[in-house]
Amino acid sequence: PGPRAQAARANQNVPGVKTIIAVASGKGGVGKSTTACNLALALSGFGLSVGLLDADIYGPSMPRLLGLTGKPEVVEGRMMRPLQAFGVKVMSIGFLVEEETPMIWRGPMVMSALTQMLREVQWGELDVMVVDMPPGTGDAQLTMAQSVPLAGAVIVSTPQDLALIDARRGIAMFRRTEVPILGIVENMSTFICPNCGHRSDIFHHGGAKREAERLGVPYLGEIPLSMPIRESSDAGRPIVVSDPSGPQAQVYQQIARGV
Ligand code: ADP
């Protein structure tokens, strides 16, 4: 980051948290939350102390992905205790609002919810905090990118052109706020038929790698479109913990090593 951005962020460091990385996407539905969650679990599997902050105000998915239903306990007057899943401390906007509540958040409300989740939660000592950002590049996202002291951002995209155009916008947004791009991940890449082994590029293949080369940012790898990834997510036991030595988990571990 440039000196101005660094100075601004130094003031807002979250005590005890060494590194904060964002997982972002130009649009919804590309697997950003699934990637953020498995990435956090992979980092935890390496022995790091990890926090996961679900800041996706439009559709918080960590409660479901991690099978968490409780509400954070309020301690010391106003501090919230994060929930725990598979050794990772988790805070989600989804713990604070009912699932049916319409997400009509305006700038200032987004900011206060975010500030609360960063600073009024007993995160303790963390090596890494992974932030699942809201999808897109609107005002809310820009405000977040500016106000969370981010060390860098991971951009998730599907391989086809349309998604990549949005991913490009996301990268531009982080560059404008002087947040380094840690790399692009291609999600829902090649599908390998579990019955016959045939490979199908349902959403195309290789687009994210080409885009990374074009933009001069690291390419972190591709995650296949795979039924076990979706099933384990729906079941609240993400693939990195439900099948830690399987091929899909290995992909997330490789990406985690790259960030
Ligand atoms: P986003 O956070 O970008 O909106 P999600 O992480 O919620 O996207 O993923 C959207 C849907 O796609 C979910 O049902 C999820 O389980 C599924 N999904 C994500 N990545 C994969 C993948 N690599 N293979 C199969 N399904 C996936």
Image (tube, rainbow, N blue to C red):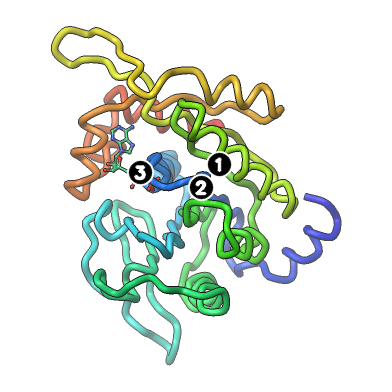
Sequence-first tag of 2 and 1: 2
Label 1 crowd bin: few (<14), some (14–19), many (20+), radius 10 Å: many
Position of 64 compared to 87: left or right?
Answer: left
Q: CA distance from mark 2 to mark 1?
A: 5 Å
> Can residue 62 be seen in the rendering of this structure?
yes
Label 2 crowd bin: few (<14), some (14–19), many (20+), radius 10 Å: many
Q: CA distance from mark 2 to mark 3?
A: 10 Å
In the rendered image, residue 238, in percent from the top left (x then y), is placed at 27, 43
Sequence-first tag of 3 and 1: 3
190 and 204: which one is in front?
204
Mark 3 near mark 1, Cβ–Cβ under 8 Å?
no
Position of 201 compared to 48: left or right?
Answer: left
* Farthest-out residue, right: 3
> Can residue 37 be seen in the rendering of this structure?
no
Tag 1 residue: 154
The amino acid type, in three-letter code, at marker 3 is Thr
Tag 3 residue: 34
In the rendered image, residue 150, in percent from the top left (x then y), is placed at 64, 55
In the rendered image, residue 244, in percent from the top left (x then y), is placed at 28, 33
Identify which residue is drawn at 67% across, 30% down.
217
Note whether ligand 1 is within 8 Å of mark 3.
yes
Secondary structure of the residue carrying tag 3 is helix
Secondary structure of the residue carrying tag 2 is strand
Identify which residue is drawn at 27% across, 37% down.
239
Mark 2 near mark 1, Cβ–Cβ under 8 Å?
yes
The amino acid type, in three-letter code, at marker 2 is Val
Secondary structure of the residue carrying tag 1 is strand
In the rendered image, residue 189, in percent from the top left (x then y), is placed at 39, 23
Position of 239 compared to 201: left or right?
Answer: left
The amino acid type, in three-letter code, at marker 1 is Val
Tag 2 residue: 23
